[in-house]
């Protein structure tokens, strides 16, 4: 299981996401979608410890 609570990220004084919380249970699939600059890669880097 992966659980994230109250994630917040700002880049260059721009809020990418705030108060983001979710749970992904074993065996579940997740798709992260959004426009360019929405914070998709930043979110994945945060979750993997690369940010």
Image (cartoon, helix red, strand yellow):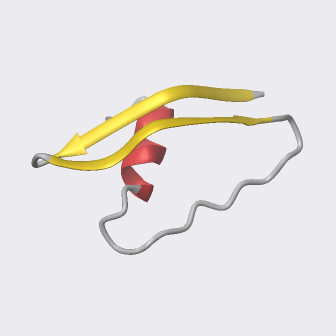
Q: Residue furthest right?
A: 27
> Relative to residue 30, is residue 42 drawn left or right?
left
Q: Position of residue 34 (x, y in %)?
A: 48, 69
Is residue 50 visible to us here?
A: no
- Looking at this view, is 47 or 16 the one in front? 16
Q: Residue furthest left?
A: 12
Is residue 37 placed above or below 8 in the rendered structure? Answer: below
Is residue 11 placed above or below 47 in the rendered structure? Answer: below
Q: Residue at x 55, y 67 (%)?
A: 33
Q: Position of residue 43 (x, y in %)?
A: 44, 45
Q: Residue furthest front?
A: 19
**Quadrant where the N terminus is found in the figure:** top right
In terms of image quadrants, where is residue 25? top right
Is residue 13 visible to us here?
A: yes
Is residue 14 placed above or below 46 in the rendered structure? Answer: below
Task: Count up the numbered dots.
Answer: 0
In terms of image quadrants, where is residue 24? top right
**Quadrant where the C terminus is found in the figure:** top left
Q: Residue at x 23, y 42 (%)?
A: 10
Q: Residue at x 49, y 34 (%)?
A: 48
Q: Position of residue 26 (x, y in %)?
A: 86, 35
Q: Residue at x 56, y 25 (%)?
A: 5
Q: Position of residue 39 (x, y in %)?
A: 37, 55
- Looking at this view, is 50 or 5 the one in front? 5
């Amino acid at each position: 299981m992966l659980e994230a609570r109250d994630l917040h990220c700002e880049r260059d004084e721009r809020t990418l996401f705030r108060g983001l919380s979710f749970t992904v249970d074993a065996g579940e699939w997740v798709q992260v979608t959004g426009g360019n600059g929405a914070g998709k890669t930043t979110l994945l880097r945060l979750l993997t410890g690369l940010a």
